[in-house]
Image (cartoon, helix red, strand yellow):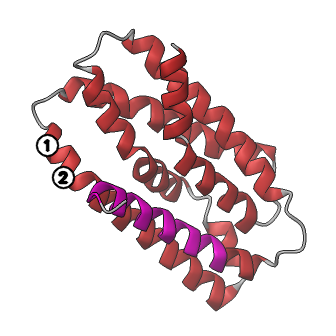
Amino acid sequence: MLNILLIGVGLSMDAFAVSVTNGLTIPNYRLRHAAVTAAYFGFFQGLMPLLGWLLGSTVSSLISAWGPYVSFFLLAFIGVKMAAEALRGGGEAGEATLRHSRLVVMAVATSLDALAVGVSFAFMDVPLIASVLLIAAVTFVICLIGGILGSRVPGISTRAAGVIGGLVLCGIGVKLLLEGVGAL
């Protein structure tokens, strides 16, 4: 289970960065916001390996081929929109970043690599349910901490944080794309 714990930590790093970004960009970000964000990320990081296991090897090449592009598109879209909203309006734009629809998109985008891990679980002898629950729990805790840490950074205006946060999301998308096409 130590290997699964380490996999969970590795899978949650992109979600952690997005959680920190949410903490930075949303005015009056509180523990309940961090918990909701962490719940979305934990749920999808746990769900995706299960779906990947179910898919097994039947479509693993499709997942491997398109996953990086889908992740890049979703994160880049949200990142550009977040930066544009921050440049246009400031405070009100930050409030919109915690909408449930946006959280779902961010959670799916950062958990597509967990889908590929789930495909590999189909060919390994791992306790599937325990592994999925551990990955979800690790992601929840790491994202909760990330959101809290992001909200505690002093002296950053909502507008600047929105632009920086949007650029961070775009950067994560580019990183996932480059990793997926083998450039990194």
Q: Farthest residue in the right direction?
A: 154
Q: Is residue 111 above or below residue 163?
A: above
The residue under label 2 is: 65
Which mark identifies residue 61? 1
Which residue is at 48% across, 71% downward?
170
Asked if the stretch drawn in magenta spans residue 102, the answer is no
Q: How many marks?
A: 2
Where does residue 75 sit, x and y in percent of width and height?
Answer: 44, 64
> Which quadrant of the rendered structure holds the C terminus?
bottom left
Which residue is at 59% across, 56% downward?
18
Which residue is at 34% across, 67% downward?
73
- Under mark 1, the amino acid is Ser
Question: What secondary structure do most residues of the magenta stretch adopt?
Answer: helix
Q: Is residue 61 above or below residue 96?
A: above
Q: CA distance from mark 1 to mark 2?
A: 6 Å
Quadrant of the rendered structure where residue 127 is?
Answer: top left
Where does residue 129 sit, x and y in percent of width and height?
Answer: 41, 13
- Under mark 2, the amino acid is Ala
Residue range of the region highlighted in magenta in the rendering: 163-182
Quadrant of the rendered structure where residue 115 is?
Answer: top left
Q: Farthest residue in the front direction?
A: 184
Q: Tell me whether circle 1 and circle 2 mark residues in contact (CB < 8 Å).
A: yes
Q: Farthest residue in the left direction?
A: 58
As rendered, which of 176 and 104 lies closer to the eye? Answer: 176
Residue 16 is left or right of residue 161, and the answer is left
